C-alpha cells in the first residue's frame, strides 16, 4: 500500500474522530443543529479516509457519497444499512444548516452520533487491514 495514501487516510480519520468529539460536546450542550453538522462531517471525513487509499477525491459531497455507496456499500465492503444512514446524515445536515424552519429532534441527533461512531470504527479497521496488506 502506498505510504502517502495511508498517511492521508489516517489524517482524514483523525479529522473524523475530532469531529466526533466536537459532536459529543455539542450534543451534551443541547446544541443539536451544530451537533448534526459536526456528526455529518465526522461521517464525511471517515468516508474520505477510505477514498484516500484509492487516491480519489471529488469536489462535491454528493459525489463522494455516491462513489462510496457504489464501490463500498453496494459491494458490501461496508454494511448496506450504512448507505441509508449516510444518506440520512447528509439530509439532516442540509436541513440543520439551511432550512430555517427545521427543528432538530434529539433522537435524530443521537442517530447521527451513533452512525458517526459506527462508521469511524469500521473505517479504522478497514485502514488498519489495508496497512497490513
Image (spheres, grey):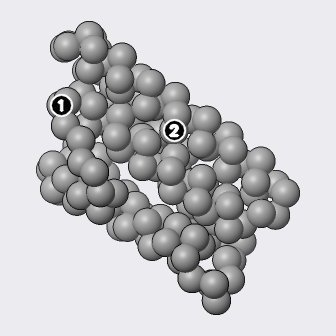
- Side (left or right) of 76 relative to 32: left
Q: Is residue 16 left or right of residue 71?
A: right
Q: Which residue is mark 2?
A: 16
Can residue 128 be seen in the rendering of this structure?
no
Question: Is disc 1 surrounded by few (<14), some (14 to 19) or many (20+) residues within 10 Å?
Answer: some
Quadrant holding the N terminus: top left
Residue 123 can be seen, yes or no: yes
Residue positioned 72% across, 48% down in the render: 24
Depth order, front residue of 63/104? 63
Above or below, 31 relative to 38: below
For residue 102, side relative to residue 123 (left or right): right
Q: Residue 23, relative to residue 133: is it above or below?
A: below
Q: Residue at x 32, y 30 (%)?
A: 126
Q: Is residue 106 above or below residue 68?
A: below
- Residue at image coords 71%, 71%: 106
Disc assigned to residue 54 = 1
Q: Quadrant of residue 9?
A: top left
Using residue 79 as the reference point, say whether residue 100 is left or right of it: right
Q: Residues within 10 Å of mark 2 (few under 14, many from 20)?
A: many
**Residue 89, how many percent across, how many down?**
47, 65
Q: Earlier in the sequence, mark 2 or mark 1?
A: 2
Could you tell me which residue is drawn at 68 percent across and 68 percent down? Answer: 33
- Residue 14's x, y, as percent? 52, 28
Amino acid at each position: 500500500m502506498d505510504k502517502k495514501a495511508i498517511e492521508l487516510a489516517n489524517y482524514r480519520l483523525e479529522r473524523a474522530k475530532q469531529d466526533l468529539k466536537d459532536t459529543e460536546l455539542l450534543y451534551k450542550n443541547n446544541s443539536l443543529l451544530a451537533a448534526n453538522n459536526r456528526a455529518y462531517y465526522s461521517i464525511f471525513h471517515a468516508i474520505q479516509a477510505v477514498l484516500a487509499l484509492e487516491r480519489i477525491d471529488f469536489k462535491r459531497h454528493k459525489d463522494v457519497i455516491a462513489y462510496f455507496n457504489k464501490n463500498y456499500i453496494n459491494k458490501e465492503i461496508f454494511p448496506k444499512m450504512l448507505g441509508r444512514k449516510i444518506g440520512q446524515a447528509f439530509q439532516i445536515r442540509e436541513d440543520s444548516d439551511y432550512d430555517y424552519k427545521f427543528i432538530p429532534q434529539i433522537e435524530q441527533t443521537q442517530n447521527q452520533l451513533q452512525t458517526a461512531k459506527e462508521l469511524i470504527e469500521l473505517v479504522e479497521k478497514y485502514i488498519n487491514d489495508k496497512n497490513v496488506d
